[in-house]
Amino acid sequence: MALPVAVQVYSVREDAKADLRGTLEKIKAMGYDGVEFAGLYGNDPEDIRKMCEEIGLTPISAHVSYLDMMGAPKGILSKYATIGCKYVAVPYLTPDYRPGTPCFAEVIENIKMLGKVAKEMGIQLLYHNHDFEFMKLDGKYALDILYEEVPAEYLKTELDTCWVNVGGEVPAEYIGKYSGRCPVVHLKDFYGEKSENMYELIGIKTEAPKRPSNFELRPVGSGIQDFPAILKAAEAAGTEWVVVEQDNPSMGLTPMESIAKSREYLRTLGY
């Protein structure tokens, strides 16, 4: 059975900021089954719940800042419980909290706590990786250490297939490694080589020296990823949803055109 397909609204954030309801209606018209939020764009959680219900989109999950959740765990998570999100993901760690810093051990303990609070509210906590979690600590990837230290009951994976690939692993194989623990998988395509300032493509400013790079994020099916293998692995691993994400447009397309192209490609594969 083909997996349902959602889109990360961050992919079309400027459109969402200008007109969230209109943007959600366009997403539905493209053939998406659900959405994953990254911000509420000034809207009330109850209003967003109603929008999704009326439009016919499932609000499956949300990316919520680690520091925001730490500031008020129940207050922040309650917003997404109101919307009806089944999942909330830690989306990104700023440099001070990443593997290899003194704070990373603290992050692991805090994620345990956040996972427990989320569970009490009927939400499953996820972790959305980039490539920096593929740093090795004592011979193991930091990402694997996180999942070893935090019980699966409190933390499941949201493997981002682009960053798994950039991190040096084969996405389909890595999904298989976490079979039964990867309810949501991010479908993200790319082309080119890793560079010091590639995170500027996801809206993170860096101080790395500029140098020529051909790295770019692309619509699903327009880059180097093996999506038939990724989707087959996701189905075998018990994944419930796949989520299209493209942080920055390329190929001369607008953000909305990019996610439409991704949806069209997935339809050719039977999704």
Image: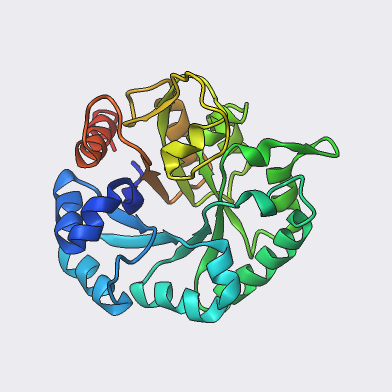
Query: Can residue 139 be seen from the camera position used here?
Result: yes
Relative horizontal placement of residue 192, taking residue 51 as reference (left or right):
right
Give the x, y percent position of residue 53: 22, 69
Using the image, determine if residue 158 lies above or below residue 108. above
Along the line of sight, which residue is nearer the eye, 94 or 267?
A: 94
> Among all residues in the image, which is located at the extreme right?
138
Relative horizontal placement of residue 271, taking residue 73 as reference (left or right):
left
Query: Can residue 119 be seen from the camera position used here?
Result: no
Q: Quadrant of residue 102?
A: bottom right
Relative horizontal placement of residue 17, taking residue 172 as reference (left or right):
left
Residue depicted at x 16% and y 69%: 54
Using the image, determine if residue 157 lies above or below residue 247. below
Give the x, y percent position of residue 33: 26, 52
Looking at the rendering, in which quadrant would you find the C terminus?
top left
Residue depicted at x 55% and y 28%: 165
Residue depicted at x 42% and y 37%: 201
Give the x, y percent position of residue 140: 79, 38
Q: Quadrant of residue 3?
A: top left
Residue depicted at x 20% and y 69%: 51
Along the line of sight, which residue is nearer the eye, 161 or 137?
A: 137
